Image (cartoon, rainbow, N blue to C red):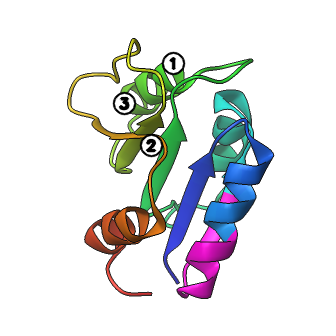
Amino acid sequence: MCQVLVVDDNEDIRETMRDFLEEEGYHVVTAKNGADALSRLEQLEAGKLPCLMLVDLLMPVMDGVELIRRLRESARFAPVPVIAISAASTVDPPPGTRLLPKPVGPTVILEEVRNACGAP
């Protein structure tokens, strides 16, 4: 089953994305910040990495920019596609990272997930 990791400090956003994507047939794991996301990724077995990560850029503890930088430096996690999501127009995602502006509708999210992961 395709797994999507949603990383956002806003619990309502995490839960809304999780509920919507699970209704569409995807397995969703959530994390409240970059450090939480790294911890969850490290607990996964080899070959069980998410097919996509949706990452907010502005979060406490570890922001999305730092998370994406660390993912790209890791041989294990670098292959996982990442889409940044942010309402802040002053924060640029790392080079090569697709950015979706908040608010982003469910149709756009579903299209991005299907493009990265295929049908559930």
- Give the labeled residue for mark 3: 72
For the residues marked 3 and 2, what is the alpha-carbon distance in whole angstroms?
7 Å
Query: What amino acid is labelled 1 in the image?
Result: Glu
In the rendered image, residue 55, in percent from the top left (x then y), is placed at 51, 40
The span picked out in magenta is 19-29
For the residues marked 1 and 2, what is the alpha-carbon distance in whole angstroms?
14 Å
Q: Is residue 68 magenta?
A: no
Element under label 3? helix
Note whether 60 is above or below 5 in the view shown: above
- Give the labeled residue for mark 2: 77
Element under label 1? helix
For the residues marked 1 and 3, what is the alpha-carbon distance in whole angstroms?
10 Å
Identify the image quadrant of the C terminus.
bottom left
Is residue 58 toward the left or the right of residue 111 in the image?
right
- Give the labeled residue for mark 1: 66
Note whether 59 is above or below 53 in the view shown: above
